[in-house]
Amino acid sequence: MMSEELRSRLGRTHRPRPSIPRLIAVALCGALVSLAVSAGAAGPACACSCRGSTTEEAALDADGVFLARATGKASSGSDDIYEFAVAEVFKGEVDSVTTVGTPHDGPSCGVSFELGRDYLLFVDAGLSEGVGRGWESNLCMGPATLSMSDVRGVLERDFGPPRPPNPATPTQLLDAADEVPVKSSWWTRVTATVPLPLLVVAGGLVLAAVGWLVVNRRRRGTRP
C-alpha cells in the first residue's frame, strides 16, 4: 500500500509547471484588454470641439501674436510647457525667448509643437502667472484657416509690419513645483520616442518573466 509520504512526493513530481509562453500570453492579453478599455473610455472624453474663428477674431481675443521657433519642452502635471525663440511680433509685449503652456491632451484642446519648427502663435496671458510659463495657448485660440500666408496678410493689414521681440536673457524651462531649471522629464523623453502601447506590452512581458521566476523558485524550494 502506498504510503502518504510517497503519494505526496508523486503529487509534487507530476504537478504541471507553469510555462513561460502561457504566462507571457496571459500578460499580453491583460495588457491588450487594458488598452482597449482605456481607449474606449477615453475616446469620447478626449474630443476637442472649437468654434471656428477668423484671423481678425483670433487676433482680437489673443493677448499676444508672434512668430517663433519651438526650442524646448518640459512637463508640469497635466500641462506641457514649450520654450520658443521669438522672431517677429504682431501683437503684445513678447520677449525674444518666452514660454507657452498648453494642456497635454484631452478635452482641453492642448497643442503639440514639434521642436525645431516655426509657428505663428496666438496666446493668452490670463492664466500664465506663477507656473513657469509666459503665455497660454490651445487649439481653439488660433484662426480656422491653415494658410500662414493668409494669416500674415490679415495681421499685417490690421497691426502693420511685424516688429522684433523685446531683448531678453535666454532662460531654461522651470519646473512648476520648485522652480528649478529642468529639461524634459524622463517619462516625457521615453514616451516621445517609444509609443505608449509598446511600453505597456513590454511591461507585461517583464511582469510575466518575473512571475515565472517567482513560481519556479517556490517550486524548487518545496522539493525534498
Image: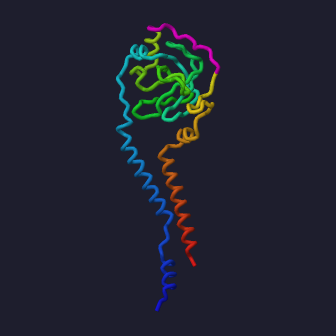
Q: Position of residue 204 (x, y in %)?
A: 49, 54
Q: Position of residue 85 (x, y in %)?
A: 58, 21
Up the image or down, 74 lies above or below 24; here it is: above
The answer to whether residue 207 is left or right of residue 35 is: right
| Rendered image quadrant of residue 171 | top right
Q: As rendered, which of 117 and 170 lies closer to the eye? A: 170
- In the image, residue 163 lies in the stretch drawn in magenta: yes
The answer to whether residue 74 is left or right of residue 145 is: right
| Rendered image quadrant of residue 106 | top left
Q: Position of residue 182 (x, y in %)?
A: 62, 33
The residue lying at 49 percent from left, 63 percent from top is: 21
The answer to whether residue 33 is left or right of residue 202 is: left
Q: As rendered, which of 35 and 135 lies closer to the eye? A: 135
Q: Specify the farthest residue to the bottom.
A: 1
Chief SS of the magenta region: loop
The answer to whether residue 186 is left or right of residue 65 is: right
Residue 150 visible here: no
Is the C terminus in the top left, top right, bottom left or bottom right quadrant? bottom right
Q: As rendered, which of 103 and 87 lies closer to the eye? A: 103
The residue lying at 39 percent from left, 33 percent from top is: 107
The magenta region covers 157-169
